[in-house]
Image (spheres, rainbow, N blue to C red):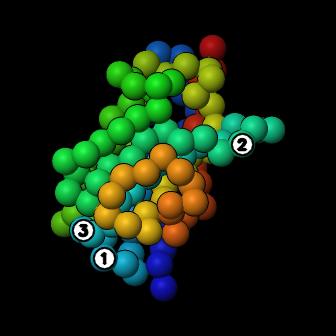
């Protein structure tokens, strides 16, 4: 059974940094692309970033480019999202997802498994 568990979300102030983690079990993590998405209240789930199985290919949404960094530790079956210079508009539930393939994708439909999400709230 596949499990993805996010952690690290909390209330922070604008300009602060935060690191989210996502532990994965039940699949061949080292062969799977991973993604981060977020969903603000009343809005659709949006792409944040994605990382290939090897970590050699990483892509970000324009809204977070230059502020957020995705990384992964295949030995620990964990993917991270480092968020710097946080803004109130970054407030959302953040989800990690395991891809159907090894390649990266910004499309939610290309991800098979999802975590339960972790709340990030950025106050102004």
For the residues labelled 1 and 3, the Cα–Cα distance comes to: 6 Å
Where does residue 55 sit, x and y in percent of width and height? 22, 51
Q: Earlier in the sequence, mark 2 or mark 1?
A: 1
Pick the front one: 19 or 69: 69
Spot the residue most to the right. Answer: 42
Q: Residues within 10 Å of mark 1 (few under 14, many from 20)?
A: few
Where does residue 33 sit, x and y in percent of width and height? 35, 59
- Please give the name of the residue rendered at 71% of the width and 42% of the height, measured from the top-left corner: 44
Residue 45 bears which disc, if any? none
Spot the residue most to the bottom. Answer: 1
- Residue 53 vertical position relative to residue 42 in the rendered view, above or below: below
Where does residue 99 sit, x and y in percent of width and height? 43, 63
For the residues labelled 2 and 1, the Cα–Cα distance comes to: 29 Å
- Do the residues bearing badges 1 and 3 touch, measured as CB atoms within 8 Å? yes
Q: Which of marks 3 and 2 is nearer the N terminus?
A: 3
The residue labelled by disc 2 is 44
Drawn side of residue 33 relative to residue 35, left or right: left
Q: How many marks?
A: 3
Pick the front one: 124 or 114: 114
Residue 28 bears which disc, if any? 1
The residue labelled by disc 3 is 30
- Please give the name of the residue rendered at 39% of the width and 47% of the height, measured from the top-left corner: 50
- Under circle 2, the secondary element is loop
Drawn side of residue 106 relative to residue 45, left or right: left
Quarter of the image for the C terminus: give it.
top right
- Please give the name of the residue rendered at 49% of the width and 55% of the height, measured from the top-left corner: 96
- Residue 95 vertical position relative to residue 15 in the rendered view, above or below: below
Drawn side of residue 87 relative to residue 68, left or right: right
């Amino acid at each position: 059974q596949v499990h993805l568990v996010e952690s690290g979300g909390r209330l922070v102030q604008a300009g602060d940094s935060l690191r989210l983690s996502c532990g994965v079990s039940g699949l061949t993590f080292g062969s799977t692309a991973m993604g981060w998405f977020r969903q603000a209240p009343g809005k659709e789930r949006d792409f944040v970033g994605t990382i290939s199985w090897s970590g050699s290919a990483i892509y970000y949404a324009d809204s977070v480019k230059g502020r957020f960094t995705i990384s992964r530790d295949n030995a620990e079956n964990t993917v991270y999202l480092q968020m710097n210079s946080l803004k109130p508009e970054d407030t959302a539930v953040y989800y990690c997802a395991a891809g159907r393939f090894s390649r990266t994708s910004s499309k939610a439909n290309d991800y098979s498994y999802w975590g339960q999400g972790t709340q990030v709230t950025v106050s102004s």
